[in-house]
Image (cartoon, helix red, strand yellow):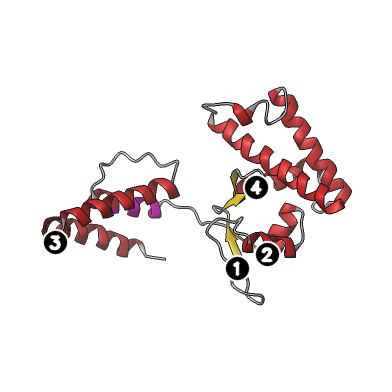
Amino acid sequence: MSTQQERQLVVEKSEQILDYTIKQTDPEFYRAFSNMLYDYITVTNPKKVTEYQKDLRDLIRLMAEVVNHAQPVKVYTTGELARIFGVSVQAINKWIDEGRFLGYKREGQNRHNRISENTSFVMRTGELTAVRDVVAMYERQNQEHEVVELNPDEHRNAILDEVSRFMKKYGGTYEMTLGTKAGRTTSEDRDASIWLALLDELRGINEAKK
């Protein structure tokens, strides 16, 4: 990872040279690269309010600022994810091969695969949820039931309890409530992600029993 001194050097040098090189010699490339970097920052940091114009110098400064204040990103092994999702390690590897962890490729049979908490997971419904939201759901289940490890029946019952809690909170099924609601709040978006992950996990458990 770059040091703070290196990031400061990039910011200072970019302000000195960009106007005299890329911007003047190839303005079309400068504009395209600025737009791409702007898109990358807003996609990877959706909660960051981007007040700058799409100018490369300002975007480089913003990028350095984002990195300076970034918190360490947690990563999870396939074994940890198997426990969190309530499935086998083989199922996690299958999901990786199927591309359900967006942008992540398995590194081989004997390699230690680690998936970031920011990785998006594709549920059976086709909707996306972040791995961190699934982790949050798992941790809350453990806290509420005061157990670290659940047997399969307890795990399924815990999921059903969580689904029932959401149904009571919103007055119906996911499809009847958050699934069709436009303009959801941040809290509702978080609940929707967790609720969908619960439903997806429940379907997986039920299919495994067939």
Q: Earlier in the sequence, mark 2 or mark 1?
A: 2
**Rendered image: mark on residue 93:** 2
Image point (60%, 68%), residue name: 106
What distance separates the C-alpha of mark 3 from that of mark 1?
40 Å
Picture coordinates of residue 210 (x, y %)? 87, 51
Quote the CA–CA distance across marks 4 and 3: 46 Å
The tag earlier along the polypeptide, 4 or 3, is 3
Q: Amino acid at mark 3?
A: Thr
Is the residue 180 above or below the residue 198 in the image? above
Q: Earlier in the sequence, mark 3 or mark 1?
A: 3
Question: Marks 1 and 4, Cα distance to the nearest angstrom?
Answer: 18 Å
- The disc labelled 4 sits on which kind of residue? Met
Q: Nearer the viewer, mark 3 or mark 1?
A: 1
Q: Which residues are magenta?
A: 60-67
Q: Which of the numbered marks, if any, corresponds to residue 106?
A: 1
SS class of the residue under badge 2? helix
Report how far apart the C-alphas of labels 2 and 1 lie in the structure. 7 Å
Asked whether the beta carbons under mark 4 and mark 2 sit within 8 Å of each other, the answer is no
Residue at 18% across / 56% down in the picture? 15
Q: Which mark is residue 21?
A: 3
Of marks 1 and 4, which one's residue comes earlier in the chain? 1
